[in-house]
Image (cartoon, rainbow, N blue to C red):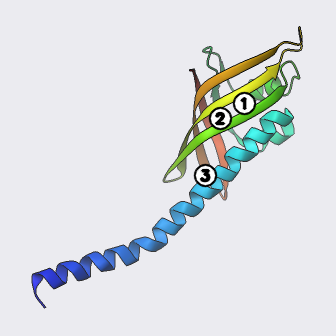
């Protein structure tokens, strides 16, 4: 066997060894995607119970107007009923799993009804989420929004 054959054999061996980790990474991305979708549905439902099981105790939730909420404040405001969602879409999500963390980005298109006057307000945002795996569950640790 010459050097070329050894190099080809080594590359093939490395590719075969990488297959389980690629499958594992895809499985983790799928798990995160399911949690992100559960979070979107929980936002529409607007209940602190549905949202509470998806967020970490140390949550830092940043709005596009600069407000930052901790877990308690986020859950209280998200379930207040002051601005219920009429529609909420997460477009073109990307998920990158890095160890026990996942970086999620997407385009947010939402419509909320203002309880004060009944107006429908549209939101067009770019969202960055950081999810962290704790035990077997992914929890939202941080979220940041930027107006588009």
Label 3 CA crowd tier, 10 Å (few <14, some 14–19, many 20+): some
Depth-wise, is mark 3 or mark 2 nearer the camera? 3
Residue lying at 59% horizontally and 46% vertically, measured from the top left: 132
Q: Is residue 80 visible?
A: yes
Quote the CA–CA distance across marks 2 and 1: 7 Å
Q: Residue furthest bottom?
A: 1
Residue of label 2: 58
Residue lying at 10% horizontally and 87% vertically, measured from the top left: 2
Q: Secondary structure at mark 2?
A: strand
Question: On the picture, is 101 further left or further right than 10?
Answer: right
Residue of label 3: 133
Residue lying at 79% horizontally and 41% vertically, measured from the top left: 41
Nearest to N terminus: mark 2 or mark 1 = 2
Residue of label 1: 71
Q: Is residue 69 above or below residue 59?
A: above
Q: Secondary structure at mark 3?
A: strand
Q: Position of residue 134 (x, y in %)?
A: 63, 52
Q: Quadrant of residue 70?
A: top right
């Amino acid at each position: 066997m010459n050097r070329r054959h050894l190099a080809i054999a080594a590359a093939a061996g490395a590719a075969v060894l990488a297959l389980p980790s690629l499958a594992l990474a895809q499985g983790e991305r799928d798990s995160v995607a399911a949690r992100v979708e559960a979070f979107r549905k929980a936002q529409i439902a607007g209940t602190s119970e549905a949202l509470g099981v998806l967020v970490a105790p140390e949550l830092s939730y940043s709005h596009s107007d600069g407000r930052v909420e901790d877990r308690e404040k986020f859950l209280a405001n998200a379930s207040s009923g002051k601005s219920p969602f009429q529609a909420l879409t997460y477009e073109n999500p990307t998920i990158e799993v890095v160890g026990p963390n996942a970086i999620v980005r997407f385009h947010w298109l939402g419509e909320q009804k203002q309880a004060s006057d009944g107006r429908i307000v549209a939101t067009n945002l770019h969202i960055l989420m950081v999810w962290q795996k704790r035990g077997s569950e992914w929890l939202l640790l941080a979220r940041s929004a930027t107006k588009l």
